[in-house]
Image (cartoon, rainbow, N blue to C red):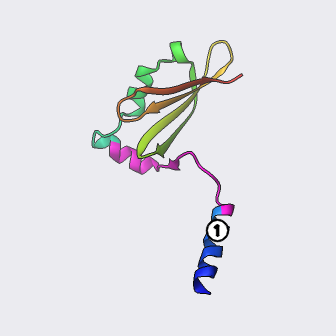
């Protein structure tokens, strides 16, 4: 009986839980990781992906995906299109570039 009830509670929780690509990371945690040299600062990232080439920064988010901190930058290009860049926060490498229609 207890096992059945536990199973139903767990199953209901799984049904009601949204599927997420990554987990949020706090600004304080990011600051500490940057201070310890484990992540690049926003200034460093923006110097690697300059406004002239990638557009004006509209939004920035940070998430942890599979143990890696990812910066997601949304930029507005000169042609009016919005671009999303996913960047590895440890080394600045571009993981994904997507141009929205």
In reply to whether residue 31 is colored magenta, the answer given is yes
From the viewer's perspective, tell me whether residue 16 is left or right of residue 32: right
Q: Nearer the viewer, residue 88 or 77?
A: 88
SS under mark 1: helix
Q: Nearer the viewer, residue 69 or 52?
A: 69
From the viewer's perspective, tell me whether residue 52 is left or right of residue 81: left
Residue 80 location (% of width, % of height): 69, 17
Residue assigned mark 1: 11
Against 2, residue 86 (above or below) is above
Q: Residue at x 54, y 18 (%)?
A: 54
Q: Nearer the viewer, residue 86 or 48?
A: 86
Q: Residue at x 35, y 38 (%)?
A: 39
From the viewer's perspective, tell me whether residue 56 is left or right of residue 41: right
Against 17, residue 37 (above or below) is above
Query: Which residue, as the protein is rendered here, is positioned at the far bottom?
Result: 1
Against 40, residue 21 (above or below) is below
Q: Residue at x 41, y 50 (%)?
A: 28
Residue 8 location (% of width, % of height): 65, 74
Q: Please give the range of residues in magenta.
A: 15-33
């Amino acid at each position: 009986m207890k096992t059945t009830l536990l199973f139903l509670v767990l199953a209901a929780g799984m049904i009601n839980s949204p599927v997420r690509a990554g987990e949020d990371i706090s600004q304080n945690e990011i600051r500490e990781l940057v201070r310890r040299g484990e992540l690049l600062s926003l200034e460093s990232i923006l110097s690697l992906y300059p406004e002239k080439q990638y557009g004006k920064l509209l939004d920035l988010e940070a998430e942890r995906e599979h143990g890696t901190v990812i910066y997601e930058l949304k930029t507005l290009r000169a042609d009016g299109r919005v671009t999303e860049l996913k960047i590895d926060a440890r080394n600045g490498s571009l993981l994904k570039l997507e141009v929205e229609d």
